[in-house]
Image (tube, rainbow, N blue to C red):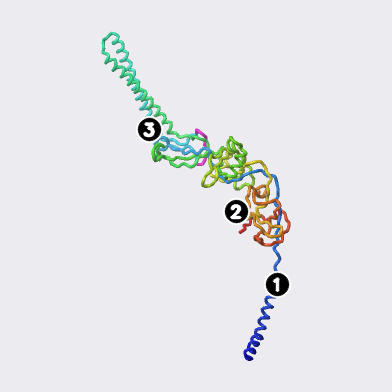
Amino acid sequence: MSVIRIGAVGLLLAAAPTIAGCERSQSDVVQRPQPPPPTVTVAQPLQRLVANEEEQVGRFAAVDSVEIRAKVSGYLHAVHFKDGQIVEKGQKLFTIDRRPFEITLEQTQANLRQAESNLALAESDLARAKELVMGASITQQTMDQRAAARRSAEAAVMAQKANVRQAMLDLEFSELTAPVSGRIGDNRVSVGNLVTAATSANSSLLATIQSIDPIRFEFTLDESAYLRLQRRSGPGRTVGAGLTVKLKLIDEKEFAHTGRLEFVDNAISRTSGSIRARALFPNPDGLFTPGLFGRIRIEVGEPQQALLIPEAAIGSEQVRKIVMVVGGDNVVKPKYVTLGPTVDGLRVVREGLASSDRVIIQGLMQARPGMTVTPKAGSFAQAAPIQTSAN
């Protein structure tokens, strides 16, 4: 037993330096100073009376878009325009070889004169027959035959007149003119090629014309914007009829172009949850081209008080927009927001933010939800010009 006690005491003495070292190491860890909370710049949202507007991206589309196709078949004789030029309604564009149609017209006119001669003879025979009947010199059957011959000659004259009109129409169709004013595309068929009439299965496309003044702008509205626009228009009235709208192109900073709302569709798409709309813009200088992108601004309601924050304070979390705020305990909290249009470089926040919230406008990269920070009051002028995404 004494041997066992001596051995145990020896083990304790040997382990004593190790235990003391562990205690010192743990003491060093506990006493190591923690880094101070990161400093972020915060500011309260700006409150301002702003217009209740909706901004959407869309494309220009021609009011009239026409495909020029031949109405008669024949060999293309001449082209009377340059590719891409502005053409006026009624301007001559193409000429198909007119000689076959001129010959056909002369033939139908000759047939008409022959039919008219036959009609004159039938009328003469009928007149003589009537005189003879009065004297009972011919039978009633002969009288009926001559009356039928006259009616047949009249029908032949009417048919030949129709043939003449058709031949004149074909001759007219051998010269193709612009049905609308606008910009014409390139010539699809060279002179000397055979073009086929539009009534055939393989009709020849000669060119296309897109009207340019005025021009339409097509876009879509979501359900909330449509409801605001509907309530503003009032019950029983056409939605947004004649409402003034503003537009800017992708290389412009201001909504400098003015037009009017022309059309809102009668049903919301079940797949996209949006409704088609269309505005009309004057385009005297031809700046707007069908297919060109632009951004339109529509006033869908009366002006209202709104909160505005800089773009740099807005982050993205998948498809939702998020803003980081600092609470009274200096802890960072995320808030999901619904955004509106941009006004004077600031973004309208429609939902999700209070006027008393302290929004982080600088130092977003150092702030995480649940983190304690040191807030420093600032202004929107200190916000960075780039948008930071939050995860």
Q: Is residue 86 magenta?
A: yes
Residue at mark 3: 100
The residue singled out by tag 2 in the image is 320
Q: Which residue is mark 1?
A: 32
Which one is nearer the viewer's eye here, 253 or 14? 14
**Whether residue 294 is situated above or below residue 101 in the rendered picture:** below
For the point 53% across and 38% down, the residue is: 63
Pointers 2 and 1 in contact (C-beta within 8 Å): no
In the structure shown, which secondary structural element does the residue marked by tag 1 occupy? loop
**Magenta highlight: main SS:** loop
**Is residue 74 something one can see in this rendering?**
no
| Residue in view at x 62 percent, y 89 percent | 4
Residue 108 placement: quadrant: top left
Q: Under tag 3, what secondary structure?
A: helix
Distance of label 1 from label 3 (alpha carbons): 105 Å
Q: Nearer the viewer, residue 370 or 359?
A: 370
Which mark sits nearer the N-terminus, 2 or 1? 1
Q: Nearer the viewer, residue 79 or 111?
A: 111
Residue 98 is situated, as x and y percent measured from the top left of the image, at: 41, 33
Question: What are the residue bounds of the magenta stretch?
Answer: 83-90
On screen, residue 386 versus residue 115, left or right, reads right
Q: Are marks 1 and 3 in contact (CB under 8 Å)?
A: no
Nearest the viewer among 25 and 114 is 25
Task: Assign a secondary structure to mark 2.
Answer: strand
Q: Whole-percent x and y of residue 234?
A: 61, 37
Local crowd size for mark 3, using a 10 Å CA cut-off: few (<14), some (14–19), many (≥20): few
**How packed is label 1: few (under 14 Cα within 10 Å), some, or many (20 or more)?**
few
